[in-house]
Image (cartoon, rainbow, N blue to C red):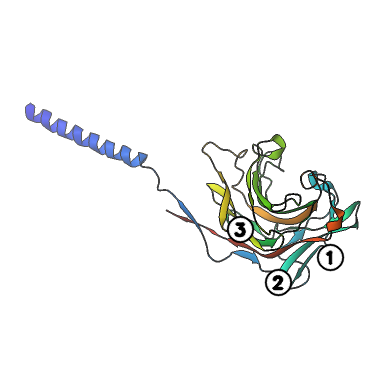
């Protein structure tokens, strides 16, 4: 009898050990994912040509409807407002009668021609200056997947915004249904950059499934993390986004201190736009 009990005990003990091993194996945490970015662009425009922006890469958003911000420019597709010369894209805002408004400018959009999910995005640019200018390099969700099918539910990433009344300060922000300026929950930051209008600087975004970071000249100054428990209201950044490049005039932010008509024309020069792929390593 005692020998039988010993054998049963050994079997039970072995079973418990096996179960314990299985439990430990199930509960073992997944290895952390490390994110890197490729060194060769998967999409780019070096602006090494002349004339209108490459129609294989850029569309125009046109109109004089205020664009939801009471802006004062009419966006056109004219070469006077957007042209490529001397290796740069030049977006120019002009004081002139245009459409129903008194300024013209351009807004280039890569939607349908450059749409991206994750990666590193770099734009080397020299900005306009003067009270009333509001240049931006930014991204919007290409697909209308969430909520009201528009802004801000499908997300916005502002890689660079600048307002001329605050000359050497640049801003990086994200906008979602839960986090946006219209309900005073905006997530973003700003930093001082010398000579933003006389020198080129590299404005960049690093976007992974876990975070979005905004940098200028390689220095990160804003990071937004995809926190546990977030849904699309906080993090709609799991769908493709596209570029927008523009100069607005006036508007709710750019026009807070009025518009100085003596400064025009004003231009934003872009040396290149580059997209590097995300690489996941475990």
Residue 61: x, y in percent?
79, 55
> Label 1: which residue?
80
- Looking at the picture, tell me which residue is in the foreground, 60 or 138: 138
Establish if 83 lies above or below 150. below
- Element type at marker 1? loop
Q: Quadrant of residue 115?
A: bottom right
Pick whichever of labels 1 and 3 is earlier in the sequence: 1
Pick whichever of labels 2 and 1 is earlier in the sequence: 1
**Residue displayed at 15% across by 31% down:** 8
Q: Are marks 1 and 3 in contact (CB under 8 Å)?
A: no
> Label 3: which residue?
121
Residue 258: x, y in percent?
83, 47
Residue 41: x, y in percent?
58, 65
Q: CA distance from mark 1 to mark 3?
A: 27 Å
- Disc 1: CA contacts within 10 A as few (<14), some (14-19) or many (>=20): some
**Residue displayed at 84% across by 65% down:** 80
- Looking at the picture, tell me which residue is in the foreground, 74 or 177: 74
> Label 2: which residue?
87
Pick whichever of labels 2 and 3 is earlier in the sequence: 2
Q: Quadrant of residue 176?
A: top right
Q: CA distance from mark 2 to mark 3?
A: 19 Å
């Amino acid at each position: 009898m005692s020998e039988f009990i010993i054998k049963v005990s050994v079997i039970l003990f072995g079973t418990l050990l096996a179960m314990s091993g299985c439990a430990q194996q199930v509960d073992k945490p997944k290895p952390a994912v490390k994110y890197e970015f490729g060194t060769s662009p998967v999409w780019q425009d070096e602006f090494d040509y002349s004339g209108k922006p490459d129609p294989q890469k850029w569309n125009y958003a046109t109109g004089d409807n205020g664009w939801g911000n009471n802006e004062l420019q009419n966006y056109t597709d004219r070469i006077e407002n957007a042209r490529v010369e001397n290796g740069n894209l030049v977006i120019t805002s002009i004081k002139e009668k245009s459409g129903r408004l008194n300024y013209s400018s351009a807004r280039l959009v890569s939607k349908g021609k450059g749409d991206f999910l994750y990666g590193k995005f770099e734009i080397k640019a020299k900005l306009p200056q003067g009270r009333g200018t509001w240049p931006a390099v930014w991204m919007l969700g290409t697909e209308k997947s969430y909520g009201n099918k528009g802004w801000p539910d499908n997300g916005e990433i502002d890689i660079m915004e600048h307002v001329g009344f605050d000359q050497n300060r640049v801003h990086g922000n994200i906008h979602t249904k839960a986090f946006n300026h219209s309900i005073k929950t905006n997530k973003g930051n700003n930093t001082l950059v010398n000579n933003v209008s006389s020198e080129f600087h590299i404005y960049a975004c690093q976007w992974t499934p876990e975070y979005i970071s905004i940098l200028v000249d390689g220095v990160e100054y804003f990071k937004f993390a995809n926190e546990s428990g977030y849904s699309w209201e906080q993090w709609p950044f799991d769908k493709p986004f596209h570029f927008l490049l523009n100069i607005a005039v006036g508007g709710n932010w750019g026009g807070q201190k009025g518009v100085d008509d003596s400064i025009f024309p004003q231009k934003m020069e872009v040396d290149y736009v580059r997209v590097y792929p995300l690489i996941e390593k475990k």
